[in-house]
Amino acid sequence: MKPLEGILVLDFCQYLAGPSAALRLADLGARIIKVERPGSGDGSRRLILEGCTSDGDGLNFHTINRNKQSIELNTKSPEGLTMAKKLIAQADVLIESFRPGVMDKLGLGYNEVHALNPRLVYASISGYGAASPWAAKPGQDLLVQSLSGLAWLNGNADQPPMPFALSLADSYTGVHAAEGILACLVRREITNEGGHVEVSLLASVLDLQFEVITTYLNDGNKAPERSEFNNAHAYLAAPYGIYETSDGYIALAMGSVVELGQIIGSDQVASHTDESEWFTNRDAIKRDIQAALETDTTANWLSKLEKHDFWCSDVYTWEKLVASDAFKALDFIQDVSRVAGQQVLTTRCPISFAGEDFGASKPAPRLGEDTEAIIDEFHLNDTKEA
């Protein structure tokens, strides 16, 4: 039995942040009913990355919406709204990711549905928070990375702001939403009352930066200074960074510059004995380290450094990672294709339970494929009002 079996979640979301929160609950055993607009459904069905699709939907949709069911409901019509309310009355969790105020206009805001179902855990995901002066701005990942200051932490000092090349804000917000929902479900077991969980992309990305923002707030509000050379962390000293070798790259974490110089046989690196200089003069020190490391292979440097327990690693491409024994030991890839003879390979849930194998996920649903079954099961066509 999965931990959340018996919990019914309604996913009123599109794209990534909200659906990823629902996905994590699905991975843990909750039943997820995805409520979609008739005819078009979740916009991520048509969000195509690298031209990759399967059975009419983008691969991204298949990844984020596995283990879910789909019902088409027009909540702007009286009939569809009534059906939605009847479904909500029987649910444990509702997740929505519209701009603030949209669900209220539909008649499905928190206050209204709480009166309908006091035990419901209602999760709202927005770009900047309902009370924010930016509430009407598009809550999109790149825009939030840019507004949050995160993009200014990446790249070298002479480079422009550089966002992370993935949907980091959306994914991290989905994690926070799932955490809040689970906490509220635990509290419900004590109080018999649901609650309203609110998360935003902006707050989640600020939380992701808690380490550096805390330093900024307690260091005279001095702006972080990116390294000019091999920047990897605005507030960490040399040798922290990724360096080129004669045949690839090597990553060096925190450690003694002097010890590093001794291990790699560089008197120039080992000469930097003043620890305070490791930060104030980190660019020059990093260049000295680079000059030494580019003379030999990654494998040889790893062999020498690991013998002295110096924190280091190779820098893998995905091709090399997937071929590694460590990746294979995770058993992290599954096929979620819904068409015989095709493959849709994606990742598994990162959470496991010792000794328990719950098997592969169910494929993502076709738009509305469960509509009639859900209407019948939950008696959504009954004439009795919700």
Image (cartoon, rainbow, N blue to C red):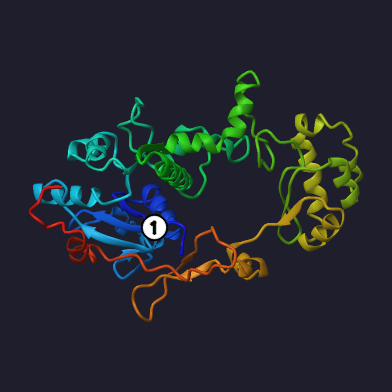
- Nearer the observer, 108 or 299: 108
Q: Is residue 153 above or below residue 380?
A: above
Question: Residue 174: x percent and y percent?
Answer: 43, 47
Q: Which class describes the residues within 10 Å of circle 1: few (<14), some (14-19), or many (20+)?
A: many
Question: Residue 232: x percent and y percent?
Answer: 66, 42
Q: Is residue 357 above or below residue 246?
A: below
- Nearer the observer, 70 or 138: 70
Q: Is residue 351 left or right of residue 372?
A: right
Q: Is residue 286 left or right of residue 20?
A: right
Q: Amino acid at mark 1?
A: Ala
- Nearer the observer, 109 or 140: 109
Q: Can you name the residue that lies furthest to the left here?
A: 383
**Mark 1 sits on what residue?**
30
Query: Can residue 296 be seen by looking at this rendering?
Result: no
- Nearer the observer, 336 or 263: 336
Quarter-of-image position of residue 105: top left
Residue depicted at x 58% and y 63% = 318
Query: Can residue 90 be seen by looking at this rendering?
Result: yes
Question: Residue 207: x percent and y percent?
Answer: 52, 35
Q: Can you name the residue that lies furthest to the top here?
A: 220
Residue depicted at x 40% and y 58% = 26
Question: Residue 22: x percent and y percent?
Answer: 38, 53
Q: Is residue 160 above or below residue 40?
A: above
Q: Secondary structure at mark 1?
A: loop
Q: Is residue 306 left or right of residue 374?
A: right
* Count of numbered tags: 1
Q: Is residue 301 left or right of residue 97?
A: right
